[in-house]
Image (spheres, rainbow, N blue to C red):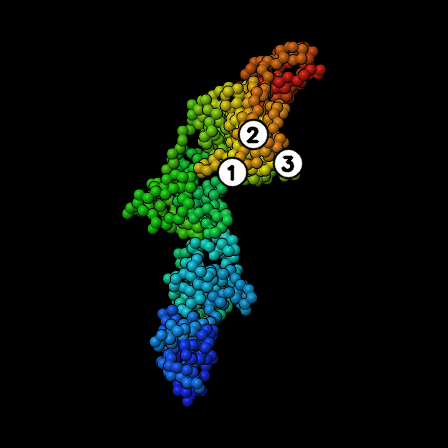
Amino acid sequence: MLRNSALFFALSAFLPLSTSAQCEATSTVYLTDYLFTPDFLTVNVGDTVAFVNADGIHNVDGTAATNPVPFFLDEVEGDIEGVCMGTVVFDTPGTYTYESSIGVQPELGMTGTIVVDAVTLTDRLFEFWGGGELEALDAFLSSYVFTAYFSSSFLQGSENPGWLGDVDLDGNEPFTVFVPVDDAVDELMDLMNLGQFDLAAFYDMPAALRYHIVPGVVLASDLEDGMVLPTVEGQNLTITLTDGGASVNDAQILTTDLTAFNGVLHLVDKILAPPGYPSATTWDAIVQSPDHTIFEQALLNEGLDAALRGQPILNDNEPAEGPFTVFAPTDYAFIAFAEENGFASVEALLSSQFMDDIVYAHLVEAEYTSGDLFNGQTLISYNNTPVNIAVDAEGIAANTAAVSTPDILAYNGVVHALGEVMPFAFPPSEGTCGSWTVNLFSDADWGTGWGGSILSVFADGNLIASETKTTNEPESFSIPVDENTRLDFVFIFGGETGAYGYDVVNGSGDLLFSSAGSVNFNGLTTPPRSVYGLKPCGEAPSCGLVEIAFTDQSNDGWYGGNLAVYSGTELEANVFFNPDFDGDGFADYLPFSERRVLVAVEEGEVNFVVNSPVVFAELCGYVVRDPEGNVVVDETGTSEAPPSTYGVEICATSPVDDAEGVSLNLFPNPVEDLAQIAGLQPTDNWEIEVRSIDGKVVHRQRGTGPTALHLAHLQAGFYTLRLSRPNALDATLKFIKG
């Protein structure tokens, strides 16, 4: 039976020797000169201990400050038959020390200890773990967390994180605990995106658990309809009684009256959440809002939904990002922003290259409720830009955008709705050579499309644009281009399978470069290729594009290495493998076993200068193929760090001399619609194959003698032409269309 919460000792009066029957007890301690026998005793709650003096004059002094409850028996002179000094009923668990405090008796060793044991709430919670009578009740998960936070005995020593001050389920103060069953906890962990034991480390958990704990003992028989129970968290629980049983708030009470010395447990089928307590992640809060559909789509496009649904869990090997403060513009705010900045539609805004910076500027990786914000405060956004806070009588603003609804609380942060999109400084739309457009496309019938792959654009090695694409929808963005600038378009595989790629188009609509990946019938993916060294305002490279295939048997992606490509002394490309592709200020580790890139080079000698990888360099290598696909450099399988290669003759000069010493040339060059090959004999039968700058065959034709070439269907750009004739070596010519 649970004992009264007003714990006390029942002390018997001193009993004379003649009434030894009145000294009956569960255990007896005998006193002789300077000795208690036994001097260490363990008893249960409610047991009675008798003290019998068999020699000398002694008292029993249990008034030490460390004792849960003090006790004292007056001095008595004993004799050999034993004099009953009195009895003590130990109703409170804990460790008691006592002594005979007369004169120097304590110093002479007349001391003793009694340990009073009891089944506490912690002990009952442990029984859910296995091996106890409550194991079958399926409340392991919540019992583990309650024990971790509120049991002083859960972890021993000074580093114990469990005992939280005024609530100790091991202590003497009684509590009533509503314990959610495993199904309820599983539902919460799924909502919070947590692993099984992550729940114990979740930073908001103590407050949530305290809402399940009520001071005092409330048995099932004590429950009344409409009863209000104050929790140690500070808010109240409400009891409802129906024909179907009892419930606390909206949680059904499944099992009642699991009693312990210091309280009682009741099992419930739901997590109890106080009013105003978060019930979702920041991502869920945005999805559930009818006013944030555009912002939701923007976050999806940027692949940020997983981050906003993650949890910053303590002691996790791979901690999630967050918590977050999300400044969330409403749909109306985005519509107005698109109109004000000249976008044809919200869809055009969402597909622009600026959306990643716009969206990232509205996220702060820390939690700031309205009470944490003050006038003049500066926060740092997800893309390392400032968010300037203004607070006045009219409310809160972030970068001048007014907060319309503050403090939408979430498990992993807080959402503040904005009535405006934060101002954004759009870069110039054109450079000295106008602007180029990059079109991202995919074939939805072949796999998942881009699936998080990245296309980054570098101007002279500096990142000027980067798109992370997660959907199959077509998308375009523009970049200003300047004369004498070297542009690199670097594709980073996102790990998904699909047929997708990209085009680069100049301001006149002419195709400059195109690369598409593919998926074969076995599901194997060939990703799009990166291209380095495209130059605005200049002539097409006289040689075209060479392919460099990088290999790394250790799958470390040439980590720490790079390769520079020179046409003579002019730098055409600097292929880095770990630059800051995502723009977060840190080098990106991008492992691969093979990666193919294209580099624009000029006729003549080409040099390949290697900065050797720092990780397993002997397992790295590279192969160079000319525009016709011929291997001109092979530095693989050497079991050494890949060497530089100098003086590689990639392209012959034009016109081309055939085997008879006859000069062959194509005219006019640049080509409009028709062209001819000069130097052919009237009886020469020939076949041509025309390839675009990315190696695709775009035209084939057969003829005899100086027959006209029909090239009107070709888009503007740089091409190579291979001429084949019987009993003659093939010849390769270069030309420009348009």
Amino acid type at circle 2 is: Val
Q: Are marks 3 and 1 in contact (CB under 8 Å)?
A: no
Residue ID for mark 1: 589
Q: How crowded is mark 1: few (under 14 residues within 10 Å), some or many (20 or more)?
A: some
Going from N to C along the chain, the mark reached first, 3 or 1, is 3
Q: Mark 3 points at which residue?
A: 520
- Give the x, y percent position of residue 60: 38, 77
Q: How many angstroms separate mark 3 from mark 1 (CA)?
A: 28 Å
| Dot 3 crowding, Cα within 10 Å, few <14, some 14–19, many 20+ | few
Q: CB atoms at circles 2 and 3 under 8 Å apart?
A: no
| View extreme (left): residue | 393
- Residue name at image x 38 percent, y 73 percent: 106
Q: Which residue lies furthest to the right in this view?
A: 727
Q: Which residue is drawn at 59% across and 33% down?
A: 618
Query: Which amino acid is tagged 3?
Result: Asn
Amino acid type, callout 1:
Tyr
The answer to whether any part of residue 387 appears in the image is: yes
- Report x, y in % for residue 201: 46, 55
> Toward the viewer: 53 or 210?
53
User: Is 699 on the left or on the right of 152, as rendered?
Assistant: right
Asked if labels 2 and 1 touch by Cβ distance under 8 angstroms, the answer is no
Percent of width and height locating residue 241: 45, 69
Secondary-structure class at tag 1: loop
Label 1 vs 2, first from the N-terminus:
1
In this figure, which residue is indicated by the disc labeled 2? 597
Of 152 and 104, nearer the camera is 104
Residue at the image position 57 percent from the left and 24 percent from the top:
645
